[in-house]
Amino acid sequence: MKNVPLATIERVAKYLRCLNRLSEKGIKVVSSKELAEHTRTSPEQVRKDLSYFGRFGKTGTGYDTQKLSRKLERILKAQKKWNVCILGAGSLGSALARYQGFKDTGYNIIAAFDNDPEKIGTKIGQAEVYDIKNFKEIVKKKDIQMVILAVPKEAVEEAEEIISKTNNIRGILNFVPVTIKLKTRRKVAIIDVDLAQKLYILSYLIKRGREMT
Amino acid sequence: MKNVPLATIERVAKYLRCLNRLSEKGIKVVSSKELAEHTRTSPEQVRKDLSYFGRFGKTGTGYDTQKLSRKLERILKAQKKWNVCILGAGSLGSALARYQGFKDTGYNIIAAFDNDPEKIGTKIGQAEVYDIKNFKEIVKKKDIQMVILAVPKEAVEEAEEIISKTNNIRGILNFVPVTIKLKTRRKVAIIDVDLAQKLYILSYLIKRGREMT
DNA sequence: GGCTGTGAAGGAATTCACAGCC
DNA sequence: GGCTGTGAATTCCTTCACAGCC
């Protein structure tokens, strides 16, 4: 397998989601053209992206929805079950714990952490809320590898500290509009989701009359 | 102004975020190197990005934090006040209405819409909750141009319908993991935020040991 | 010395165009 | 005819390297 563009990976994730929706609806076969329409890209792009990983289609017909879905899951390592926790059980953290888009993915949000005694011991969706003091211990016990970071800005340093010390954690989805810095040698993947940035881009696109993803 | 890469726009939005944080802290001057560190990119990239729009720096010194911030706001049309509403006042919608990252941006979330009578008439953060039936009317009256879409999957079609009919709306930030299609000729910018996709990418990055944004 | 700004070079990603298959 | 798969061409984006300035 050659060097796959990251942009391809991002689209593959979209294809996967789309395929799952289609197969829920009972659609067995899909063409690159259809897949492209659902994901705002071009048919050539779809075919090119998939061609990095193998030949999955039937000429003249298209792709078997379910088969392709399984292939893509494997590519994204999404067939594995990932245990995810949420750090910060405020309104955003709680909403993310309940987010319907995680349903039917391999990602299970099984714990949330907060320092508010009122919240500790309660449940949000599937996730039990624990005292943040027990982060390391519970992350280990429950084999959690990803954190969704949704604490208030002021608590970021503390969160960095705790995550740095917890060797299990290998990825962070960060909703706090601050650049987070870990004090650790080990590699931790970080994806920032900055919603204000999205709105900035949206206003730019409006001015330019474009569409994007 | 030449043809500016979209990738540049995305980074510019990050620079802006970062500059505002720095000037809050009282930092007056910043170099491309520093800005790059805060936004996980390279100094050359920062300078190149900015050079699309003009010359903002002082050689040997760096950039005036506040001045640059104002310039970038203008570029992104973010100096304008945008009125934003939320469609769907469930847990995600409510959390977004309260999202701290929108503070100190030009984006004001001034209304939310739902069909739950229990919610209508209440307030979430700054936003009053209205009956979705009055969407068009209130959007017009309040001069709202952007929608944050956070309804359940099942309600997407209805939402598409309503938005299509409301000429004011020019941009959508979509949190529903579905490709939305408007029945209108006018241009509406759409940005999809798919959180499950982010987790897919995160697991891919973990496997590859990389970092990104 | 330390920084910006920018053409030029290089590298990456997308689109084209067509061969091959059912 | 309708579709996939893929080298080749093109477009887009990033990095390099250095001129110019304080």
Image (tube, coloured by chain):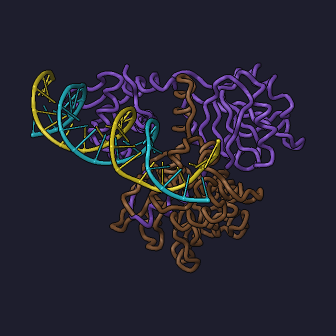
Chain colours: A brown, B purple, C cyan, D yellow
In-front residue for pair B204/A148: B204
Tell me what residue is drawn at x 48 percent, y 52 percent: A49
Picture mark count: 0
Tell me what residue is drawn at x 45 percent, y 37 percent: B10
In-front residue for pair B138/C5: C5
Q: Position of residue B202 (x, y in %)?
A: 50, 59
Tell me what residue is drawn at x 62 percent, y 62 percent: A69
Say whether residue A99 is visible.
Answer: no
B201 w.r.t. B188: above or below = below
Q: Position of residue A3 (x, y in %)?
A: 36, 58
B14 w.r.t. D5: above or below = above
Say whether residue A179 is visible.
Answer: yes
Locate residue B119 relative to residue D5 in the image: left or right.
right
Q: Position of residue B82 (x, y in %)?
A: 61, 25
Tell me what residue is drawn at x 64 percent, y 63 percent: A105
In-front residue for pair A145/B184: B184
As drawn, the residue found furthest toward the bottom would be A141
Quarter of the view holding residue A203: top right
